[in-house]
Image (cartoon, grey):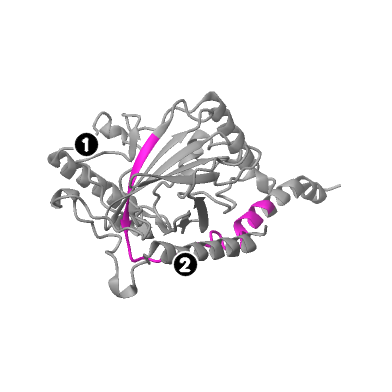
Amino acid sequence: MPSLERFRYLAIVAIGVACASQAIGGQAAPAASQKAPAASQKAPAASQKTGPVKLPRTADGQPDLQGVWNYGTEMPLQRPDELAGKTSLTPEETAKYREEMAARRRERQTGKPSRYSGEVFDDVLAKADWSKRTSLITDPPDGKIPEPTPLAAKRRADRTAAFERGEAPEDFGLADRCIMGWSTGPPIIPGNQSNVLQLFQSRDHFVIYTEMIHDARIVPIDTQPAPPSVIREYSGISRGHWEKDTLVVETTNFRPEGVATLTFRQYGGTDENMHLIERFTRTDANTLLYEFTVNDPTTWTRPWSASVPMRKTDESVFEYACHEGNHSMETWLENARAKEKAPDEAAKKRPK
């Protein structure tokens, strides 16, 4: 299906599910006159609450996960090397570390500016609570992604060589080709931009609509198993079910190209063997806890898990046009063809 037609199809499905959620769930997104806190506004700490948290629920009794959520955070996925062995910091250590990070930002800003400079993105990311944790990764205990397998190391070398060769579209990754990936995965891993998604929910479906690459992942909520392994998707095939107040999404049937999450490039990317479990738990009116566990035995030597807090926001999900009509791919391939013609062109210029 052409990309434009596919987008229109997904948009229609997402809107249909959103409408169904109002009819079935009885809950709509907040009206403009009742804006949720801005993304930069910190939600009230759980310790300040008394008694059990009363969650907003749909008409069928499930927690209402709908709305626009910002998952940007200055907390790194992996624990920084200088914090090795520290799962949390004391107030004094936190203050000192914040000073060090501020100094690094100032130093970075004195260099040549770029569209990804820290002065553009750092200030909009939620501040990390270093007194509670020092990485988004919760397992392994060292807060690091496990070592890659030998197969993953070879895959990385092969994909790097293909990228450097750059002779055909297939030599470039899915993120380079704006098909999918970057920070939205799955799994969803915070980046330095476009950390916004919208969730739609009905009794039978859950839609994860991301700004980055502009993708809608449609998750049936049922007990049906995934289709046979011969049927595969770039984002895998997901099934959801409720475990008390947590929506659990289990995804398999990925394609061999992997999910194109940029974080995974240093490990050669993922492959068709990834088994992903995601958990969505609304902890209060303004906070959604997103947890995931990745198990890909041909990529990493052991499974690993992370936990990402998402904050309710009145932001909108905008169109993400990537590189506007894929002109970057056109330029890459023009350069490849020019490189191929270079010897003949040089021969023509040599004196006879």
Front-most of 247 and 147?
247
Image quarter for residue 36?
bottom left
Say if 315 sits above or below 52 in the image.
Answer: below
Name the one closer to the observer, 204 or 207: 204
The answer to if 199 sits in the magenta stretch is no
Q: Residue at x 58, y 52 (%)?
A: 179
Q: Is residue 84 above or below residue 116?
A: above
Q: Secondary structure at mark 1?
A: loop
Callout 2: SS: helix
Magenta part of the protein: which range? Answer: 305-333
Closer to the chain start, of discs 1 and 2, is 2
Circle 1 or circle 2, nearest the eye: 2
Query: Could you tell me if residue 110 is visible in this image?
Result: no
Location of residue 334 with respect to 232 vertically, above or below:
below
Residue 52: x percent and y percent? 19, 50
- Calculate the distance from the C-alpha at mark 1 to the C-alpha at mark 2: 43 Å
